[in-house]
Every structure is written in C-alpha cells, then in structure tokens.
Image (cartoon, rainbow, N blue to C red):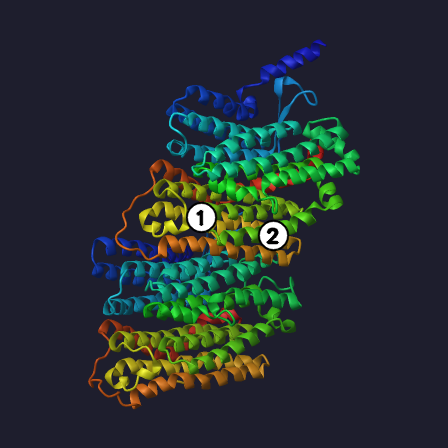
Amino acid sequence: MSPETANTAIVAALCLPLLGALGVQILGRFVSDNARDAWTVLIGLATFSQVLRLVGPVVDGARPSVALPDWMPGLGLGFEVEPLGLLFGLVASGLWILTSLYGFGYMRGHHEKNQTRFFTCFALAISAALGIAFAGDLVTLFLFYEILTFSTFPLVTHAGTEAAVKAGRLYLGILVSTSVLFLLLAILWTSTLADGLGFRPGGILEGRIEGGQATLLLLLFSNGIGKAALMPFHRWLPAAMVAPTPVSALLHAVAVVKAGVFSVLKVAVYVFGFDLLSTGGVSNLVAWIAAITILAASIRALTLDGFKPRLAYSTISQLSYIVLGAMLATGTAAMGAGLHILMHAIGKITLFFVAGAVYVVAHKDKVSQLDGLGRKMPFTFGAFCVASFSIIGLPPLGGAWSKWFLVTGAFEAGHFWLGTVFMVSSLLSIGYLMPIVVRAFFRPLPEGEEEGVADAPLLMLIPICTTALLCFVAFFYTDAVYDLLAPAFGLG
Amino acid sequence: MTDGATAHQVATEALSFADHLPALQVLLPLMGAPLCFLLRKETLASALTVVISFACLAISFSLLGQTMDGEVLVYEFGGWPRPFGIEYRVDITNAFVLVVVSLVAAVVFAAGPGQARRAIPVGREYLFYSAALLCLTGLLGVTITGDVFNVFVFMEISSLSSYILIALGRERRALMAAFSYLVMGTIGATFLLIGIGLMYQMTGTLNMVDMAVRLEAVSETRTILVAVAFVVVGISTKLAVFPLHQWLPNAYSQAPPIVSAFLAATATKVAYYLLIRFTLGLFGAALVFERIGVDTLLMPLSVLAMFMGSIAAIYQTDFKRLLAYSSIAQIGYMTLGLSLATEAGVAAGLIHLFNHALMKGALFLVAACVTWRMGATKIAMMRGLGQRMPLTMAALVASGLALVGVPGTAGFVSKWALVSAALEQDHLFLAFLIMASSVLAVVYIWRLVEVVYFAELDGEVERREAPLRLLVPTWILAGMTIWYGLFSDFSVDVAEAAAKQLFLGLGGGA
C-alpha cells in the first residue's frame, strides 16, 4: 500500500466514528432502534478495517502520518502511527464491535432509556481513543485525552440518579484536575526543555534534564495521566462503575484506562527514553508507586463483595503492571507492558461482560450472591473462568506471556523486589478471582431458586465467548504482536 | 521659505482618505453620539450605531494591517507637529487593542436593538445609543492617542458614559452599583491625573514620545518615582486589579446584560493596554521593574486575584455575578503576564486580552439571552435550559470551555503562552498555581453545566430559543473563541510583535 493510502486510513479511522455518532443520532431519532444498532456495527467494522489497513505499512517500518496546519505558531496537530499506538488502536476499535453487540443485548435486556445518546457518546469516545492512539505529539495527545474524558461523562452518569451524578462529579473532578494540574504542566515544561513535542524513538529529553528534576517531571506525567489510575488518583475508576456495564467493559477496562497506561508507556518510551529513565534511578519513585498500587489495589479487591467494584480494583492493579513495566526501562519489560495492554484488555472485558450478563439475567451484583449460578449459566461462567486464568497469568492463555516478559524484564533491570511484586500480585489475583468461579460452580443454588439453564441472551453470549476464545488465541499468536512491537522497544 | 511651503503643500496634497483613518476611528463614533440624540427614533439611532461600529471595525483592521510590519502611523491633528499639537499614534499594540474594542462593539451593538427597549423608558432609547457611542469614543480615544492628557480626557468620556449605561439596569441596585463605580473610577482617574501632572512638571511635554525621551534623564528623581506610583495605582483601579476590584462585581452584574457584555470585554482591556503603555512605553522597563519592582508587587496580587476571583465565582448564585468574579480572576492572568517582565509574558498578557474579550463577551451575551427569556440570571432558574435554549447553552459551553482553557479553544492558547512564559523564567511553582486556578474555573463552569444539562426536570419543556438577533452575535463571539483556539496565528503573531515593539520603549522606537 502506498504511503498516501495509509495516511487516508488514519483520517478515515478518526472520522468514521464521528460519522457513526451522527448517523446514530439521525437513525435513532427518526428511523428505528434496529437501524441505529445496525449502523453502529457497520461503522465499527469499517473503523476496524481502516485501522487494520495500517498494520501492513507499520510492520514494514513505515510511520504513516498526517499533519494539520499549525494551530499555534510552532504547535501543530499531528498524527503518526507507530507500533504501540497501532496496537492500542486495534484493541480499542476491535473490541468496540463486540461491545456494541453486547451493548444492544444489555441495553435492551435492561430497558435502558436514552439509548441513542448512549451509543452516540460511545462512538465519540472511540474516536477520541483512536486520536490518542495515533497522536503524533504531546499536545494532540492531550487534546484527545480531554475529549475522551468529556465524551465519557454522559455515559458514566447515564442512569441519571443522584448516585450517578455524584460519581460523575468525582470522575470528572479527578480526571480533569489531574490532567490540567499535572499533565498539562508537564507538557509545557517539556516544551521549554525539548525541541518540539513530537514523539521520537529514544526520547526527546535525553541530556536536557536530569536527577531530581527529571523524577519530578516523570511524576507529573504519571500522576497527570489520571486515566492510568495510579494511586492516589485511582478513586474515579471504582466510582465510574455506576455506568451501564458495556461502558465499564469497553471504556473502564479497555479504552479509557488503556488510553491512560498507553500514554504513560508512550511518554516513557518516546519522551524520556530508556536511557534517561534508568540513569540515576530517575524512574524508581514512580516504579515503586506503581508497585504499591499493584499490591494495595489487589488487597482491596479481596475485601470487596460488589462484583463490578471488585473487578474495578483488579483493573487498577493490572494497569499498574503496565506503568511499572514502562518504568523498568528495559526492552523486555516494556514489551511485557505493551503485550499486557492487549492481554489484559481481552481478559478484563470478558470479566465485565460476564458481570453485566449476570446482572441482566439473574439481577445479581454481589459476589456472595453468585452461589450455584455457574450451573445455570455454564457458558457465561465458563468464559469467566478462562478469562480469569488469563488475568492471573496461567498458560495457555495470553496473560501468561505479558507476565513472563514483565517479570523477566524486572529481573533483567536488576529490580528483584519489583519482580516479586508481580508474583505476589498473581497470587492475590487468584485470591480475588477464583472464589467467584468456585462459588458459581461448586456451591449449591440457594433454596428457592429455580434450577435449569438460563444463559445470557445470544447477543451478549457471542461477545463473551469470542473474547474468552481470544484469550486462547492470543497465547499462540503472541509472536505476531511481539514482531509488531519489537522495533518500538529496540528489540528488533 | 518657499521650499518649506511647497513641502507642506505636497504633504497636505498627499494626505488621502486613508491617511485620515486614525482620526476617523475616534471621530465617527464621536459625531454619531449627538446624531443619535437628534434622530430620536430608536430604529434610526440603533441602525446608525451599528453602522458606525462596523465602520470603526473596518478602520481598526485597516490600521492593524498597516502597522503589522512594525511601522508606526502618526496623525497630527490640524497638521501641527508635536509638541505643539495633539497627535494620534498607532503601532501594533494599540492597533490590536483597537481591533478588540471595535470588534466587540460591533458585535454587541448589533445585538442591541430590542435590548434597549426593555431596559429604558419608552421613547428615550436614543439616549442609550448616544451613551454607548460616547463610551466607544472614549475607549477608542484612550487607545489611539499619543498624548497623555488626551488619555485622561478620553478616559473620563468613557467612564462618565459607562456610569450612565450601568445605571440603566432594571433593578434599583443598579444606581448604587453605578455610584460606587463612579466613586472608584473618579479616584482612579484622579490618581492618573496627578501622576500625569507630575510627569508634565518634570518633562514639560504631554506628548508620549517626547515624554518618554525626556523621562530617561529624570527617571531617578523622587517626583517620577511618585508619578509611577500614582499612575500605576490609578490605572489599576480602572483595571480592577486585586484588591482594587470592589466596584466590578456590582457594576457588571447590575448593568443591563448588553452593557455588561460590552464593558467586560472592552473597558478593562483598554485599562490593561494603558498600564502596559505607561509602564513599558513611558517609564520604561528598567525604571518600573528593575528600579521600583512593580513586578514583585504585581505578581502576588495577580495570583491572589486569580484565586480569590475564581473562589468567589464558585459561590455565586447569579450567573452574571459569577462571570464578573471570573473576570477579576482573568484580569489576574493578564497582569501576571506583565509582572513576568519579559517579552513572552507581555505577549501572553496581550493574547489573553484578545481571547478573554471574545469569551467574556460571548458569556455575557449568553446572559443577555437568558435574561431575555427568563427575566433574570439566577443560576437556580437556569435548570434545564439545555433543553429549552439548546443553541444558547451550547454557546455557554463553548465559551465556558474556553474560560477553563480546554485545548481547541482560545483559552488554551492564552494559558499555553502564559505558562510557557512563566516556565521560561523557571517559575515552576507559579506555573503550577496557574494550573491550579484553572481547575477552579472548571468547578464554576461545571456547576453551570450541571444545572443547565443534568438537572432533573418535572414535566415537558417547551423549546424557546432566544431571538436570532441576540443569538447570532452570541455565536459570532463564541465561534471566534473556538476559531482562535484552532487557528491562533493571528492573535499570537500580533501579540508577540507588539510585545517586541513595546520593550523597545517609545523613546527608543521613535
């Protein structure tokens, strides 16, 4: 494919969801719900195919890019597709299709109001996530980061209840204030140090900042990217669980939070560069914050009875795997972090899908209420079991590979204790995920409940089984992803 | 003798229409004011006002075009050269401010018809237009003139007419607001006049360029040091620099909304221009910053203004009052730029001058729309307006986001410039404070958005948008806050060129 067509694919991938949002509005208002939902899937497929078109050129070493005219002297809006962003773009746009299918089942099964607004904002959020994925410089990244925050707000407060509005305030408050207070400041600071704000392999800050100042700047970045849910700015994520489950599944397990950790990884690789991060222990402070987040969030997950809140804290913990991987500043650890973006996404989205299905079918939202449900919903809980094993990191599931690279990366970098953090956290994740499986399959149904199979509706079950299957497939095709990412981390 | 006469003749002959533009800039609205009075009929008066304000806009753009490359236009009244006559002197800085003032005037006055009818006893609307044009005359005059006493005269013209405009507010409290503005305004103007008097005493000239040259020799005298103090305090009162801002919230919230839109977007901007002109142009950066340290005083005051203004805005129950307190905070950003005492800082201040005029103008026009439909601007009354007046409220969101400084809006450009300027001086903590204060802006804007869009409504709402003649100007300004956020070359280039020229000083430049 010629470079020009690759460039148009970027524009198309960014604009198609916008077109989708427009169509959803029109069809949802004036035609019918079915037409609207068909349109969403169609647009989802089209968007994904555009992102797929970028794979070939990027694997060949090209970096398709689009630059818009400067909007401030010296500050342009630009996109450039590199391996890491492409992977994130693939994950976000690919899982969007499945989540849409699931969303139809969920929203209809649950008789939600304002479905048109829901799917409109969903499409906008995907466009913003792709903008983050393909951003060619820090300012563009920041712009789409903020759009993503605002476009997901109506989704979080969808229920419109007092509790939802309160949670929405916390969501917006933490995400906006950290991004303005720390991230924007960090970007501006970088702009005074470096020539330009574009992402460059090896970093743009090498030799421009060092020691304590570099640590401070890194801290501003990692805390400013509140979507990475690094403690102590993680509270928005459990709060966002008031949203309908498709939102929690795609946005708060995949698009939004992965946009956060992706940005952290991108900053580590393309702004700081491994050399700067590893000289004089610049990244140690943030690495330890991530390690503490991993353990503290896992322990918190153990104590929670709410199904979705438990998954939310598990997400917080798993996100910090990626942050920690970035901070270890070796090719292997970063590869682990990159793979974990994919592996955790397909695993965690399955878990959330299941939580939503249980809620719609059985109206249960607490772990303690799940006794015996596995026998009523065998496929649903079977998928849950598979995805849990992937999150824990057991072969032959995708999560095993990312954990493998993360742990060896930690040892390579000489951080023995940080390596053990991953191990301990795996044990803890068994502790908070397995009881769900055990309860569902091995405990008897409480008295008064009817026996018999009542699995999730097909529209929900298909995405659930697909993503669970993907966890398997990912284990065997990890080398393809490895080859894609290798040039970004100097492992070529 | 003959040579001189010929030369003079040639000069007069060479004066084409275009050369008179600086004079027309001020004379058009000045002549329009009594004409409005004579026309009496509201339709005629309002039409004339709109025509004149658009003519002023065209002139100011033409002046900016001529000065962009650093050229300075000098217009000698009656052909009398300085120091005998009064001259108008247009460089990039004041051409830029002229554009801001006349742009806002044109858009806001176009929204005026009908507004006046509600605020003023029937049959006397023409007085509103007369006062508005006089106010415009004063503001343009202050900006364009190259004579310090002329500055004072025009400032009084604009102040007196703005007292009238504010007193037109519907509630009786408007009279009190106008009165307290009058007291503070007069004190400020008197301080300025005393300062000008002292400067005249030491230099024997009123022309800015002459004065700047001669001030260099006497800049160490105590008289001039006192003059600096008087001038800075006097202008700061007009500019509503914290803690001299007490008049502003009442004045802006009690005035008719259309007047608030005009004054909020222009009066303080012109005062800011004056502060820059006097400090950098006349006294010179060396005296004001290095010798006296005005910047070390101005910086904490600006930061306090940013925080106190924003915090006060969070607790307001009235939309217009909220906007007024937010203005105090935004003025803090501008003065903070000046207090950095660098080219980048002053440029950031000027960029924000332009951007803030657009967004505050738009927001006050939104307030005008709300007043039109709801009769008042209590925030509690704005529940569910997102469905009732969707277009108006979309303008509120657009310009509100700009106020916060969200990327893609003009406010982001300002903030970027200001924080970069602070970081350039290694003021990392100051940069952090700027960010922290914009988080406060998020809070007060979000409060509005929540009330407007996310409040629970009882029953069906009827869609009743503001009339087009209000809505279109509102969206022109709101649209410009987005436009200049995406394509900020114009504002940034002009502001940077202006800052560069300003730091040369008037004495050095001429």
**Left or right placement of residue A277 versus residue A399 in this view:** right
Amino acid type of the residue that numbered disc 1 sits on in the rendered structure: Asp
- Mark sitting on residue B240: none
Q: Which residue is mark 2?
A: B304
Asked if the residue under mark 2 is in contact with the one under mark 1, i.e. CB atoms within 8 Å, the reply is: no
Q: Residues within 10 Å of mark 2 (few under 14, many from 20)?
A: some
**Left or right placement of residue A475 versus residue B444 in this view:** left
Quick one: which residue is furthest to the top in this view? B2
Residue B105 in sight? yes
- Mark sitting on residue B318: 1
Helix, strand or loop for disc 2 = helix
**Chain that bears disc 2:** B
Q: CA distance from mark 1 to mark 2?
A: 22 Å
Amino acid type of the residue that numbered disc 2 sits on in the rendered structure: Leu
Helix, strand or loop for disc 1 = loop
Residue B504 in sight? no
Instruction: Name which residue lies at 57% across and 44% down.
Output: B246
Image position, residue A66 (x, y; %): 45, 54
Instruction: Name which residue lies at 21% across and 61% down.
Output: A34
Asked if badges 1 and 2 are on one and the same chain, I answer yes
Q: Pick whichever, A336 or B463, lies toward us.
A: B463
Q: Is residue B455 above or below residue B226?
A: below
Instruction: Name which residue lies at 22% across and 86% down.
Output: A448
